[in-house]
Image: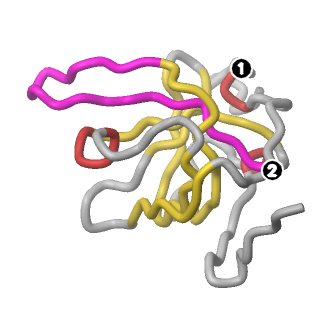
Amino acid sequence: RFKMNTTEYKTNKIVKDIKNGDKNIDIQVILIKLVGRHNTKTGGCITTYLVGDESGSIHCNFYDNVSNFIKEGDVLYITGAYSSLYNNHIVLYQPKIGYGHVTKIDEFFFQFSLKPNISEKEFDPQNNNM
């Protein structure tokens, strides 16, 4: 069985522990499924993937400077990411330029779990819980 050496990629979160409003997330994930693409008002593009690690999965938005170079099956190391609500669901966001990095570290060889899908849970901002 292939096992990736993760010692050089220091993480501070796993998917199942991501909460609304988390910042400076350093995480290793695999791009499981392309969820969609849409254009921004400024002419850019946002690409949403279902990403995951062995603890679960979450939607993650990537901007055109990264989304043009990634595909399903890529294993990424993301530093400086943040989470926020979109339509009352938690989404992970690629860091803004200058605040972190997205690095492709492998393809296909990464253990992940589809459940729990953190983005499927509806967040109640009034009670600050899910």
Q: What secondary structure predominates along the stretch shown in magenta?
A: strand
Magenta range: 36-53
Q: Residue at x 49, y 66 (%)?
A: 79
Q: Residue at 25% x, 39% y: name it.
A: 64
Mark 1 in CB contact with mark 2 (< 8 angstroms): no
Q: Nearer the viewer, residue 33 or 62?
A: 33
Q: Which residue is mark 1?
A: 120
| In the image, farthest residue toward the bottom | 8
Query: Is 26 located above or below residue 88 in the figure?
Result: below
Q: In the rendered structure, which amino acid carries the disc numbered 2?
A: Gln
Residue 109 image point, x, y percent: 71, 54
- Location of residue 25 (image quadrant): bottom right
As measured in the structure, the alpha-carbon distance from the residue carrying label 1 to the one carrying label 2 is 20 Å
Q: Does the magenta segment cover residue 52?
A: yes
Whole-percent x and y of residue 62? 38, 40
Of residues 18 and 110, the one drawn nearer to the viewer in this rendering: 110
Q: Which residue is mark 2?
A: 111
Callout 1 environment at 10 Å: few (<14), some (14 to 19), or many (20+)?
Answer: some
Residue 97 image-quadrant placement:
bottom left
Side (left or right) of 9 relative to 78: right
Give residue 114's position: percent from left, percent from top: 80, 31
Q: Secondary structure under badge 1?
A: helix
Horizontal side, residue 108 vs residue 64: left or right: right
